[in-house]
Amino acid sequence: MSEDKKAQDCIGNIKISEEVVAIISGMSASEVKGVAGMSNTFAGGIAELLGKKNLAKGIKVELGENTATIGISLVVEYGCKIPDVAWEVQEKVKKAVETMTGLEVLGVNIFVDGLIIPSEEKPPEKQEDEQ
């Protein structure tokens, strides 16, 4: 055991809550282009798009002693390649959680629960000036 590890053991334990890991995961996932938001299907079974205020919702975290397994329920923007978006979310979440917490991420499971189709915005009508 290294001296740093021994020193940490003498001082006390560090425990990181599931919610902290979920918030880190949500922030990382929301930064990926193509992610419209998280979906709250884990809690109630009904897909509900959640805004950025609820970063821990739609994310399920299972913590071991020094490991984490993360499940993220996403809504993806229409037109994006879903496998590419999912892979990028997996990579970003894994890196962020491991860097910020020191936990080993065993897996980041992605559940795509819906697509957001962009609404067709009508350009403002031009008013013709009568001269």
Image (tube, rainbow, N blue to C red):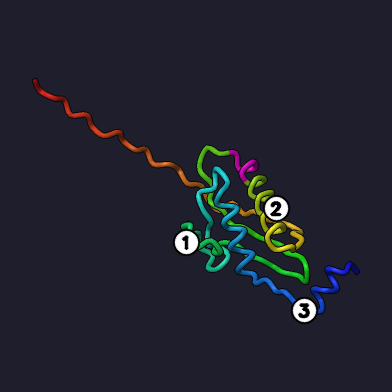
Question: How much space separates mark 1 and mark 3, taking CA atoms?
Answer: 35 Å
Query: Looking at the image, is mark 1 or mark 3 nearer the viewer?
Result: 3
Location of residue 11 in the rendering, given as x and y in whole percent from the top left corner: 77, 78
Q: Secondary structure at mark 1?
A: loop
> Judging from the image, what secondary structure is the residue with disc 2 in?
helix
Please, what is the three-letter code of the amino acid marked with disc 2? Lys
Q: Which mark is residue 11?
A: 3
- Say above or below: 12 vs 105: below
Q: Amino acid at mark 3?
A: Ile
Query: Residue 103 — which label?
Result: none
In depth, the one of 20 and 121 nearer the eye is 20
Q: Magenta region: which residues?
A: 81-85
> Is the C terminus in the top left, top right, bottom left or bottom right quadrant?
top left
Q: Measuring 57% from the left and 56% from the top, which residue is drawn there? A: 27
Residue identifier under label 1: 53
User: Which residue is painted at 67% across and 45% down in the image?
Assistant: 87
Could you tell whether 68 is left or right of 33 in the image? right
Q: What amino acid type should be assigned to the residue bearing mark 1?
A: Lys
Mark nearer the viewer, 2 or 3: 3
Quarter residue 94 falls in: bottom right
**Separation of residues labelled 2 and 3 (CA atoms):** 27 Å
Query: Quick one: label 2, few (<14), some, or many (20+) residues within 10 Å?
Result: some
Q: Of the residues under marks 2 and 1, which one precedes in the sequence?
A: 1
Q: Which residue is mark 2?
A: 95
Q: Position of residue 71 (x, y in %)?
A: 65, 60
- Residue 104 drawn above or below residue 3: above
Q: Quadrant of residue 14?
A: bottom right
Query: Which is more N-terminal, label 3 or label 2?
Result: 3
At a point 81% along the width and 79% down the height, the residue shown is 10
Alpha-carbon neighbours of circle 3 within 10 Å: few (<14), some, or many (≥20)?
A: few
